[in-house]
Amino acid sequence: MSVLKTIFTWWNGATTGIYFTIARSGRFVGADELGNRYFEARNDLDSYDRGRKRRWVIYKGYADASKVTPDWHGWLRYTFDEPPTVEPFVIKSWEKGHLPNLTGTIHARRPQGAISQGGDRQAATGDYEAWKPE
């Protein structure tokens, strides 16, 4: 079944075509703690900007851009010249850890008043006045 997934789906990791691209013109740069693998082109022939080598990620599992950690995101978007495997990303003490987009999962934020929380919310405090056309 995984061979068929590789051939016919793009959202469950890489397709067969990307493996040919990697073999032809890519080089492995590194992987993050989530299991995503990062690649860079060997030259700038396929690049949109001459002088810049193309960079891409192959997601582990479902393809979701929010699964890219901040250090690798900076490298993918050319904010950093060196990948985090060469020059580690300095995390400040006030920065929170990376979380992927949790919308639509059981871990999504559900504030009071959300339908999934029963739909009950606090009554309006009276500081709101509806607009009426004149």
Image (cartoon, rainbow, N blue to C red):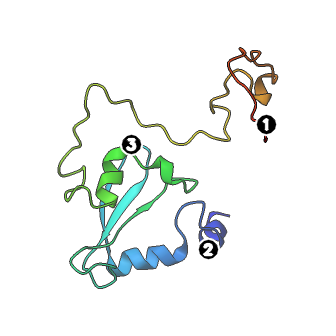
Mark identifier at residue 132 = 1
User: Camera-side residue: 128 or 111?
Assistant: 128
Question: Around disc 3, counting alpha carbons within 10 Å, would you say few (fewer than 14), some (14 to 19), or many (20 or more)?
Answer: few
- Depth-wise, is mark 1 or mark 2 nearer the camera? 1
Q: Residue 41, position in %: x, y?
A: 30, 74
Q: Is residue 52 left or right of residue 131?
A: left
Q: Amino acid at mark 1?
A: Lys
Give the Cα separation between the discs numbered 3 and 2. 26 Å
Residue 52: horizontal and vertical position, in percent? 24, 73
Quarter-wise, where is residue 63 in the image? Answer: bottom right
Q: Residue furthest front?
A: 134
- The first of marks 1 and 2 along the sequence is 2
Q: Secondary structure at mark 3?
A: loop
**Disc on the earlier residue, 1 or 3:** 3
Q: Residue at 78% of width from left, 41% of height from top?
A: 133
- Give yes or no for contact between labels 3 and 2 (Cβ–Cβ under 8 Å): no
Say what secondary structure mark 2 lies in.
helix
- Depth check: 110 or 20 in front? 110
Instruction: Identify which amino acid the numbered label 2 is placed on.
Output: Ile
Q: Residue at x 63, y 63 (%)?
A: 2
Q: x and y percent of residue 29 in the render? A: 28, 60
Classed neighbour count for the residue bearing mark 2: other residues with Cα under 10 Å, few (<14), some (14–19), many (≥20): few
Q: Is residue 26 left or right of residue 82?
A: right
Q: Say which quadrant the N terminus sits in.
A: bottom right
